[in-house]
Amino acid sequence: MKQAWVLRFRIVLILSLLLGVLSPASQIAQAQSDAGARARTLLASLTPEEKVGQLFLVTFTGSSLKSDAPILDLISNRHIGGVVLQSSNDNFSGGTDAVTQAAGLISTLQTAEWENAQQSSGANHYVPLLVGMSQEGDSAPNDQLFTGMTALPSQMALGATWNTTLAERTGEVMGKELSALGVNLLLGPSLDVMDEPHTDGREDLGVQVFGGDPYWVGVMGQAYIRGLHTGSNNALAVIGKNFPGRGASDRPAEKEVATVRKAFEQLENVELAPFAAVTGKSISPETTLDGLLVSHIRYQGLQGQVNANTRPVSLDATALDTLMNLGEFTTWRSSGGVLISDNLGSNAVRQLFDPTGSNFDGRQVARSAFLAGNDLLYVDNFVSSGDPDAYTTLERTLDFFVQKYREDAAFAERVDTSVERILTLKFRLYPNFTLQTVLAPQQNLPEVGQSGALTFEVAQKAATLISPDAADLAAVLPRPPATNERIVFLTDVQVSRQCSNCADQSILALDALQSAVLRLYGPQASGQVVSTRTSSHSFAELTRLLDKVDIESTIEADLQQAAWIVVAMRGESSDRAESRALTRLLTERPNLIQDKKIIVFAFGAPYYLDATDLSKISAYYALYSKTTASIDVAARILFQELSPTGASPVSVPGAGYTLSRVLSPDPNQVIPLSLDIPETGTPAANVTPMPTEVPTFKVGDTLPLKTGMILDHNKNTIPDGTIVQFLFTTGGDNAVVQQISSPTTAGVARASFRIQNPGLVEIRVVSEPALTSQILSLDVSGEQAAAVTAIVPTALTSPSATPEPLPSPTIESTPEPTRTLSGNTRFLTWLLTVGFTWLCAVGIFTLGRLRVSLRWGVRWGLLAAIGGLAIYSIVEIFLEDRSSWLAKGPGGGIFLALCGILLGWALGIYWQRRIQNSGKHTG
């Protein structure tokens, strides 16, 4: 009999553990654990050659592969970890079949790895390739494949919407389309912070950033990354760049190693903050980066005094180790976060290691990058001095690494550690390493390139009026162009090719704006524009006019006759003399622009025009992208069909638009202030609600306080960490003011105040420059506890014209702050709760066995365990709003389990007594 009860106890224990395993927290942790376990198992069976090959991400040329192609040899015989596809290497073809060709190329690469493993009779192991590319939106040159794909907006256009939902939806489209091709590694998005835009002609990242505020770059990055993971069904590894941040760089990474002279504290608070938000401080696995692309850049605050010989962070083991030892990155790294070096074949690296251009040793460069802490080594145009091609250099580098692996135990250990991370990442993408699992289904290809409606929605909500102020616009532009007025369009034309042998494609065509205007408002539409009264000229033509080298062009005559000059600009660059054509026109030929309406649309970054330039322009708008949708929106704005509702996510010095001021609390708001008391749930429809009990307080009690949502000048929530002062005035005539400072989270600040003395207490909050809030008043003069009274003052308003509507805050993306647990924390909560439950069950079993009998001890213990695990699991799995308990971490889970344990034990006691009483009556 005793053995039977023990068997039953074990069965119930197994069932209870299975119930716990079904919880979402344990599922997430289990998936991560399974990937790591499989990686370790596979790692143990790999040869040194297979391990070393996994460390390299390589490039190759061509969009079709012959059987003797070097890349196929590197895949089959050298076991490289992955490839990166680039338009500059002609990996994509132009034409209508570009998407199909790209998918076929990727399938060929993956199949080559599979077939080699099958033909080796077990000598080689099949490990899927990482197939990566950079695809940042805004077409060429930011997108590697722009033919046949949806023309998605730039990151800055998304930032200008201040809408995380749009960022997530854009990421979802990107993830879905890349995954349909078979791409499983995205080198992006950029998480750089452009806090100080370069307006002096130096190179910067342009529209390849979400903005200039660390908090908002992190928030938009989280949403975009979530979309990438969701759209790809978690089959896309997302690699954030350019770690630790290139926003303050003054030159492209591929040309020269830049130096940034910022203190380490600035680096932490600005550059590193967005990366932290999507690694160790990420709110969920979906918003967490899979890896970081480590940039070739020097930071004085991190590396001390720098000079021409100082290695960039990507090649500096001490600097990179310092960054990875910061708390937010340590946890992410220990969870499998992968580091990828930026291109080791770039001109910047070549100049660093070989200033004379005659002695570049790829083997030593790769070794330095690996020993610095990078797991994957990205190599493009990687050719050592004296080698005929990149294939030869890569073969020699692989041989060098294999030799080091066999001879150097410390080096071998580092290789094993990195390869384990790489394999874990691949197992997260593909739980099973089979060709059927790895190859993208062909039926998904027709959906690629079909999401243009989203691009138009983003373009509408991103469009920004930079100058003049919205209040002055009606006076400057009371009406759109009239039918009898001539319009001249000046365009900074951009043409690109998908491959070197492909036909030119217009990214920003000469007549792009003119065509959009005629299509929407020409004779075949509303008839507001006559085609013969419109003309288009390029910035190149304008430059020749200003240089007085082109006497045949009609541009001068057209400008003289025009009533409206509409400009489509991209941005200034030292590499393109024609990019400065507009500023030269404003300065050198004022006679051509006198008494004309000059409308400028920036399809790139908005900060290239200075205050003097803007004073000569009627209206200046920013669209941030060169997509067809952005051009259509510009045409609609020109004819006043649309009003811009976006706001620049970066400072625009020429317009006096400073981001730090714009993101500070709006002074024309009344900050809500209330007691921080949990809200009661909504009663059922058939239940009469109980009257709400008014909280009261007396001397010695603590007042829990919170603000409502505090908004910035754009009517969005203020960035996290904004300081709010809670001011407490006590003492009546002899007033004493106490102050508590509290940072905001999701736009809300919290504080607690202990009532120490009797009398009147008044509470208000300020967050400069917002100085008006609700006032809470409490009179604790008597012995009775008193209730809090709320006073709402009148909002401050300034006498001005009614402004254009500002973008509404995206409430869904900034809810009341709640504590969201990571997968590891939820797994820890589950583990501790189960352990606590069974510990209590054993105690109750022991008590029952000693006080009653073995049988009732077993029954009591089992009922207690079932009750504890059942209550916890019900809350974890089925209740939608579980944050109030489980968000408290292990303590919340243990409390729920304790309630269930006591309930189960009580049922056991009731059962035992009922049987005893039944036996007595029977007797």
Image (cartoon, grey):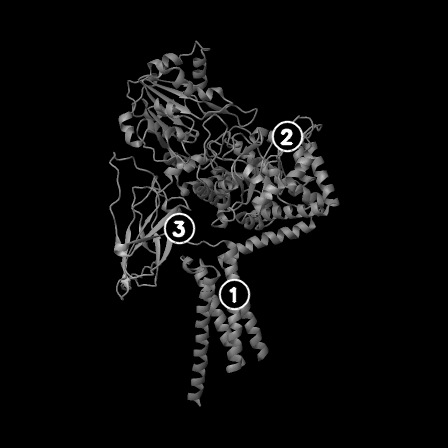
For badge 1, the amino acid type reads Val
Q: Quadrant of residue 916?
A: bottom left
The quarter of the picture where the N terminus appears is bottom right
Residue under circle 3? Answer: 742
Mark closest to the chain's N terminus, 3 or 1 = 3
Whether residue 617 is visible here, answered yes or no, is yes
For badge 2, the amino acid type reads Arg
Residue under circle 1? Answer: 834
Give how far across and how far down residue 676 sits, in percent: 35, 56
Mark closest to the chain's N terminus, 2 or 1 = 2
Q: Nearer the viewer, mark 2 or mark 1?
A: 2
Mark number, residue 531: none
View extreme (front): residue: 734
Instruction: Say whether marks 3 and 1 touch (CB < 8 Å).
Output: no
Residue under circle 2? Answer: 350
Give how far across and how far down residue 446 sits, in percent: 48, 37
User: In the image shown, does 844 or 698 lie closer to the viewer?
Assistant: 698
Mark closest to the chain's N terminus, 2 or 3 = 2
Give how far across and how far down residue 823 sits, in percent: 51, 54
